[in-house]
Amino acid sequence: MDASCISYKETGYFSQTVVDYLDDKSELRQYYSHRPDLEGFKALLQHKKVTGDRNLLAKVLTHQYHAISELTANNLQFVQANIDLLKSPHTYTITTGHQLNIFGGPLYFIYKIVTAIKLARQLKENFPDKNFVPVYWMASEDHDFAEINYTNIGGKKVHWWYEASGATGRINPDTMRQALNQYKGVLGLDHHAHELAEIVETAYTKFDRLADATRYMVNALFGQYGLVIIDADDHQLKKQFADIMEQDIIGQNSFENITATNAQLEKLGVHIQVNPREINFFYLVDGLRERLVFEDDRYKVLNTEISYTKYELQKEINTYPERFSPNVVMRPLYQEYILPNIAYVGGGAEVVYWLELKSNFEHYKVDFPILILRNSGLIIPKQSASKIARMELEIAELFKSADDIKKSWVKKHSENELSLRGEWHELQQVFEKIKQRSFKIDPTLSKSSSAVEARLEHAINNLEKKLIKAEKKNYHTRLEQIDHIKCELFPKDSLQERSENFGLFYVKWGQSFIDELVRNFEPLDFKFTVLTEQ
């Protein structure tokens, strides 16, 4: 594939806060630790404090992989080697996280992981005395089943029709047969379809937990790169975090810290992504994940009869820490507490909400990771590339609306002069003379002249639009190609990566598709990557 890049700002699809973060705007500096560059990593590595138990982490991960070991090919050797490396004080993780969307969900799920893998490689090249392990953190405790039970592929929505409750990682995927058959049907029979069909068939039929099914599928795609997949829904891992759980539930520290930060960020014009609650933990057992609240001097689990006194709550946390599940504002702290992590790879919205959290990390004396905006990409198949070439379109133009592209194309290719800017400039000079003459007669008439000028400018602009519209009709057939291109590359007028599943790209190119992404993504360049099939 041929790779080209444009700035995130130029795409028009990223928030001003993300652009400001990448541009190192001084107003945001107090809300993160180090810049996302090699100098930033050098500085962080000099004082990085690891709070979690490395040996315990390696032990838990090794145990978790037993669930898929009998059905997994050789690539587990690369994963196990990286798990063993985690025991070393010179090893650090590069982490990304995502929900357990069936079949991986949108493409950006793949891009997150590729960014983490590539960054780990680049850091090893620049800091050879250290080791860097890419980690995928499964959001296995998330309970929003409606966000993960579908994917879009080839213009079709594949839906897992099922009523589920509780942590999604604990759901049995045995009711997925209809969705599985539909997905495999879209894959077809050509090229690498059988290979991918076999992966998803095994993933969703051989395991009784969605977390294990997801681990199998992701490992099949990325195990050879040494990606380590962690399920933090674990008694031993949460036991380490129990003291902070207790402090935060009783003291409501995260609520106070993050609320104060959000107020500051709002003054800077930042759109707040998440708001903390007084208690930022859920109560979690099989089939149930409900908010914990403090009412009438008791800690209650909403929509249940479960409640605790302060003493009973402390005992429950100490005995069953796995029953307490952090929400979106405490999950990052839990992650950084148990992992030797130095960077978090996330999308634009994630980067912004992490900016809300630094004060809470400081409160609990946990190092804040370097925030890396994941690589974004647009895949242009050969057929679409041919249309783009015939229409003589530039890559940056593709990110504009279809109407704007058409206007620009017509102006560029029309044999007629469609702009009335020159004529309007001449009229402005005339109006300057009129305003001067009017002012000499009666100064108050100057405003009337300006009003007439404004109305005429509006009329000229409308006339120019009509000229362009009329000329569009003359190029109707050619301009239809722009609609086809936009529909193919920007489904539902959104970025391809936010909608389309990776499946059909894998069918076409197989594992080389992943290899191409790893080869072309540059995590620290912070540019939008466009990959064109040759």
Image (cartoon, rainbow, N blue to C red):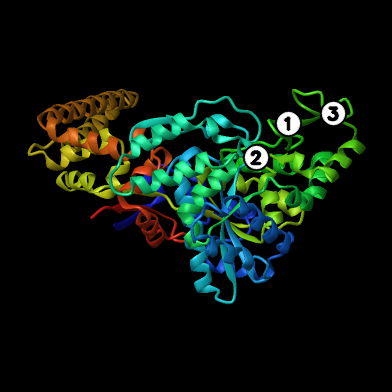
Give the residue at mark 2.
141
Q: Amino acid at mark 1?
A: Arg
Q: Residue type at mark 2?
A: Glu
In the picture, measured across the screen, residue 158 lies left or right of residue 308, that is left
Asked if labels 2 and 1 touch by Cβ distance under 8 angstroms, the answer is: no
Task: Locate residue 466: give its quadrant.
Answer: top left
**Earlier-in-chain disc, 2 versus 3:** 2
Q: Quick one: which residue is furthest to the right in this view?
A: 311
Mark number, residue 291: 1
Q: Residue at x 48, y 56 (%)?
A: 222
Residue beneath the point at 64% across and 28% down: 165
Which residue type carries mark 3?
Answer: Ser
Identify the residue at image location x=70%, y=44%. Answer: 330
Say which label, 1 or 2, has the lower sequence index: 2
User: What residue occupies the far front of the structure in this picture?
Assistant: 70
Q: Quadrant of the C terminus?
A: bottom left
Q: Position of residue 427 (x, y in %)?
A: 19, 33
Q: Residues within 10 Å of mark 3 (few under 14, many from 20)?
A: some
| Residue placed most toward the observer, 269 or 127 | 127
Disc 3 element: strand
Q: Which of the image's four quarters has the N terminus?
A: bottom left
Which circle's residue, 1 or 3, is located before the other in the chain?
Answer: 1
Q: Is residue 296 above or below residue 169?
A: above
Q: Quadrant of residue 89?
A: bottom right
Q: Residues within 10 Å of mark 1 (few under 14, many from 20)?
A: many
Residue located beneath label 3 in the image: 307
Asked which secondary structure carries label 1, the reply is strand
Locate residue 328 relative to residue 533 in the image: left or right: right
